[in-house]
Image (spheres, helix red, strand yellow):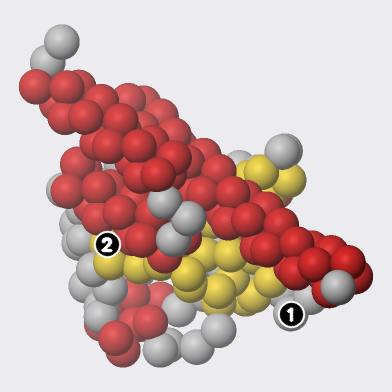
Amino acid sequence: MENKEKGYLRLFRDTCKAINSSLNLAKVLNLITENLIAALNVKACTVFLWDRERSILEVIATQGLSESYLKKGPVDADKSITGTLEGQSALIFDTLKDPRLEYPDEAKKGGIASILSVPISVKDQIIGVLRIYTSRRRNFSKDEFEFITGFADMAGIAIDNSRMYDHLKVNHESLIDEVL
């Protein structure tokens, strides 16, 4: 096995361990974003949750993006890199020329050249998006794409685990109240 593949496997394993040992969603998602940046040598990574009621993508974990880019405005789910929320990964190879990008001027100011957007799903339902940002225009290899998709799947598992735990804590308290 090549060094790159061993590195991918080690990061994947470490992230799986973190998901299994922590109920702290922020900690796990930050580990995912950090690991992807390190493994792929990219500028930034962000995990968004899809707020269907307001039709926006909300940042729940991010590494590497400037504060000004993060404050650019709400990410409209219907306008921002369409296709991802229908289950399709999408690559914006050139942020200066692709009409699917909602904030091209801010991307330019933030030094973002390419964006890969991958759906995050739980039980075949899209719940969010994982995005990889590069400072130079970049295509991703099939192996890199599969690696990123695996991390998007792990993000989905971590989010689902957190939701189930929260639901268990709320139901548990109401059951105790009923007994008392």
Find disc 1 in the rendering and name its residue. 54
Of 36 and 69, nearer the camera is: 36
Q: Position of residue 87 (x, y in %)?
A: 65, 43
Q: Residue at x 75, y 69 (%)?
A: 173
Q: Position of residue 28 (x, y in %)?
A: 38, 54
Chain-order first, disc 1 or disc 2: 2
Q: Check the picture and name the quadrant holding the N terminus.
A: top left
The disc labelled 2 sits on which kind of residue?
Ala
Q: Position of residue 120 (x, y in %)?
A: 57, 48
Of 11 and 39, nearer the camera is: 11
Q: Check the picture and name the quadrant holding the C terminus.
A: bottom right
Left or right of 37, for residue 94: right
Q: Quadrant of residue 13?
A: top left
Left or right of 80, for residue 169: right
Give the residue furthest to the front.
Answer: 180
Q: Position of residue 163 (x, y in %)?
A: 65, 58
Of 29 and 3, nearer the camera is: 29
Under circle 2, the secondary element is strand
Q: Residue at x 36, y 61 (%)?
A: 27
Residue 51 can be seen in this image: yes
